[in-house]
Amino acid sequence: PLPLLPTLPPLLLHLCPLSPNVCALQQVMGTKKKYFSTCRNWYKGSICGKKAVVLYECCPGYMKLEGMKGCPAVAPIDHVYGTLGLVKASTTQQYSDLSKMREEIEGKGSFTMFTPSNEAWDLLDPEVRGALVSNVNVELYNALHYHMVNRRMLTKDLKNDMSITSMYNNMGLYINHYSNGIVTVNCARIIHGNQVATNGVVHVIDRVITVVGNTIKDILEVNEDLSSFSAVALASGVMDKMGQPGHFTLFAPTNEAMENLGASFLERIMGDKAVIGALVDYHLLNSVQCSEAIMAGSVYETVEGSTIEIGCDGDSLTVNGIKMVLKKDIVTSNGVIHLIDKVLIPDSAKEVMELFGESQSTFSDMVSELGLSAAMKPETEYTLLAPLNPAFSDEVMSIDQSVLKVILENHILKLKHTLSELYNGQLLETISGKLLRVFIYRTAVCIENACMVRGSKEGSNGALHLMRSLIKPAQTTIYELLISDGRFNIFLSLMESAGLTELLKQEGSYTVFAPTDEAFDGLTEQDITMLTSDVNVLRTILLYHFSNGVFINGGLEGGVTNLLKTIQGHNLHVLSVNNSISVNSVDVPDIDLMATNGVTHVVKNILYPGDLPVGREDLLVLLKRLIKYIQIKYVSGFSYTEIPLTFISKCIIIMIMTALMVSEH
């Protein structure tokens, strides 16, 4: 046994002995609420956002002795009636006397009694309590029998979603045993469990429980304050499910909550069974979540498929962080209902324009101001690619509105494109008729130059994806881009000498690390002649700067080396950190120059594979002069493998035509 240390962190334990036969529990400060639970919750130190202090009490059945540590004494166990006194359930003892049930629970048998604490009896409605006490031989007797089971059941025997038969007319008791160690009976929490008796066991619960016979559907049909939600549930086809056996939690909006939605919203969704079905299912969980089992915020999947967070703040339940629960724990035979004062609306029941969040408010405002929202009607499916607010810099906002409108049109797609349906190389058509390319990477999804951030949403008539930056569709090929830039004259000349210019012009998806003229500083005419005299050498060097596929900075996995296989055959080692990249340890000053057939990253060095030797001394001298960031190996007589130009479209056509001509002759 561990010593009893006052410096221990707050504990939340269920029968975790400390000193001899001492158990720790937490009490919420300012209340009488105490919790036993599993040891995994020690560190939290709070319950429902309220500070909790640690108490140490004798474990069930043990007692203190003056002058001795812990709880070293144990008394012989008593029958159930006597055990009620031991657990300080004197009101239940008294009522057992009054109802003539004492003889039964002192006698032969094996019983489990879920006894309300004295405080639980005091919380009972005075009228209900008065009716019980005024008819002790029937009503009180039956009520106590409903708290009993005709066999001994310890908390370890009480399994989640179990229903057991009570001793009153074989009516059911509904058990939930949660992962945090809390056990409930008809949503009443066991606050002191496993007090063993000679003829059974006693568990103390925090409220008086009443007979349960209705399903969730039954409650919806008879509760007048839920008539509006009931009508929607009926129209959606979900009502029947809530009348079937199961283990559900329903957050049921009151009539006032439904009215606050507005008549236009209700009128719009009532015409679409799929939408109202999603709305109702978003209020329904496939598990029973009693309020007393909620000790902190937890995320649960709804029947609709998306999630909600159920938490607590003091005695209040919260949903998605908002206090909205008016009445807790209406227990039914197939679950529990909590009444709420707000309707929960899933994304799937919203139109796309209703999916905007604060982080995309600028885009939302601009779409409205520039008249683009008029094209997005409820009956039309579309997709919004919404840049986050920082994308709209002062420079962007100063652009002429007619130009800005064209830019924003690139962010509105025809048709609904969900994240799971996107694939690499896919072309997405905008409302202005432009085609945008999709690039799929290990850890990112990008459209043209802009990559998505987490938070995609799917609405009833489309989808919303969050973009890190504005989308700028490419207008020119890599060749046209390099020509107009003016910094790549030597690279372009060498590409022409190597017969590779077509690679820069043809359709495809390429990444090129293009060296500027500065990378060739010190290169003489004689050097250029040497390079161009052996086309295989030149192609080997140049094609090491090309990779198949479009790899933009946002698509590279950050903090690790990305290996990009080049057309030459060896790998480029690309590292992406924040908003910059390096290749083979060389800085890349300009990145993501988008083209219709790929992307260009600018380098000021010639790239060369570190593990590829050189077999000519004159070439070695030249390359060492140009490439200083690696030690190039010399292997006498080594020659480069010839690279067939099968990746160049014109070469393929010429090869096919030549083959045809040969076959004809």
Image (cartoon, rainbow, N blue to C red):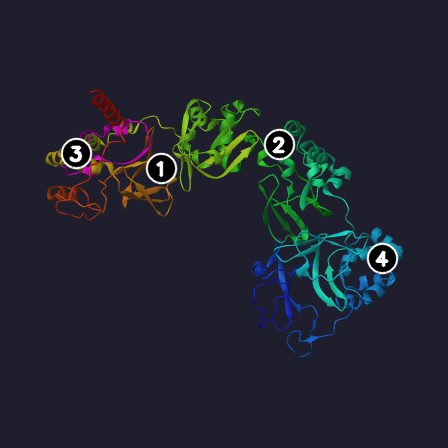
Measured as percent of width and height from the top left, residue 368 is found at: 52, 26
- Dot 3 falls on a residue whose secondary structure is helix
- Gap in angstroms between the C-alphas marked 2 and 4: 49 Å
Q: Which residues are magenta?
A: 496-523
> In the image, 237: left or right of 455?
right
| Mark 1 vs 4, N-terminal side | 4
| Mark 3 vs 4, N-terminal side | 4
In the picture of the structure, the residue carrying the numbered disc 2 is 275
- Gap in angstroms between the C-alphas marked 1 and 3: 30 Å
Q: Closer to the camera, 286 or 619?
A: 286
Quarter of the image for residue 191 reads bottom right
Q: Comparing marks 2 and 3, which lies closer to the viewer?
A: 3
- Gap in angstroms between the C-alphas marked 1 and 2: 38 Å
- Dot 4 falls on a residue whose secondary structure is helix
In the picture of the structure, the residue carrying the numbered disc 1 is 552
Q: Image point 61% across, 55% down: which residue?
A: 179
- Dot 1 falls on a residue whose secondary structure is loop
Measured as percent of width and height from the top left, residue 433 is found at: 43, 22
In the picture of the structure, the residue carrying the numbered disc 3 is 535
Disc sitting over residue 276 in the figure: none
> For the view shown, which residue lies furthest in the bottom direction?
67
Question: Which corner quadrant holds the C terminus?
Answer: top left
Measured as percent of width and height from the top left, residue 406 is found at: 43, 24
| Mark 2 vs 4, N-terminal side | 4
In the picture of the structure, the residue carrying the numbered disc 4 is 141
- Gap in angstroms between the C-alphas marked 3 and 4: 102 Å
Do the residues under discs 2 and 4 have CB atoms within 8 angstroms? no
Q: Please name the amino acid that badge 3 sits on.
A: Val
Q: Please name the amino acid that badge 1 sits on.
A: Ile
